[in-house]
Image (cartoon, rainbow, N blue to C red):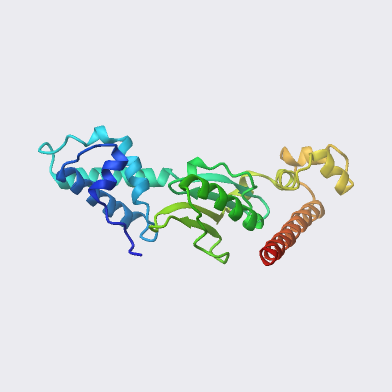
Amino acid sequence: MSKYVKITEDMIKEAFKEKSISAFNVGVISEAIYIANKKHNGHDIRTREILDFLATIKDEFWDLENKMPPKQIWDMLAKKILEYLKNSVIVLGYDVVNQEKAVAYGRVARQIKLDTDPLYSNYYLIEEELKNKISSIVGYLVKPSSPQGADRYIYFADNDGELLYVLEWHFYADYGKEQNIVKRVCAELGITQRELAERMGVHQNMPAKWSSGDEPSQMAVKFMELLLEHEKIKRQLDKFKQGFALIDEAKQG
């Protein structure tokens, strides 16, 4: 599969819902998409997604033939495409234990509401859910194009290699700065501050004071860090269990 899908007149007609299109518009649209794809990410093929976007702003350039030089038009469109691609990334959620942010983008990204928590420990469950939902949207079975590995992403493409959906996990160092350790522990373990106090054996008002600015003791901090580490290990074990369950299911099938 080549890096870019060749843009045809029929593809533009379909996206723009036009019965005919001038050679001029075919040219400026094709050049703008080529430039934007090259500048944004040469590995992802998002031609049809970009055509769908350009169709929404058609009135801004459709009748510019003989009014502006072609290069000025396609440069303008390329900038708009790049801005669209930048803003098309959806934040799905955060993993406070691993300090990761889960993001998604692609042609069908906004059509999918993920039911599974977007944690890397849920990789196999997310992959299966996405496979079913994306296949339902496109009308045929779509399988992930990338195996689980160090890159920490799930990638789906259509039969032409066009990007449909990507879910990525990125290290998010600022997350710990936005939430102190009490809020992180309570959010990750799904417990209240009073329940945290019970687990730690401290007065029920102490976690509230720590979350409001009072400095917890080093021993208290260490205890809460151990709670987070325990939760991280538990999730890793759950991930292995999910993987073994899928393997057993595949063998039985």
Asked where in the image residue 67 lies, by quadrant, the reply is: top left
Measured as percent of width and height from the top left, residue 15 is found at 31, 41
Q: How many marks?
A: 0
Q: Is residue 127 above or below residue 186?
A: below
For the C terminus, the image quarter is: bottom right
Q: Residue at x 29, y 47 (%)?
A: 11
Asked where in the image residue 54 lies, by quadrant, the reply is: top left
Measured as percent of width and height from the top left, residue 208 is found at 78, 37
Measured as percent of width and height from the top left, residue 46 is found at 37, 52
Residue ranking furthest to the top? 59
Give the camera-side residue of 197 and 15: 15
Q: Residue at x 10, y 38 (%)?
A: 66
Measured as percent of width and height from the top left, residue 63 is found at 17, 34
Instruction: Please state if 26 lies on the left or on the right of 249 as rendered.
Output: left
Residue ranking furthest to the left? 66
Residue ranking furthest to the front? 253
Q: Residue at x 41, y 57 (%)?
A: 159
Q: Is residue 231 above or below residue 13?
A: below
Q: Residue at x 55, y 65 (%)?
A: 147
Give the camera-side residue of 188 and 110: 110
For the N terminus, the image quarter is: bottom left
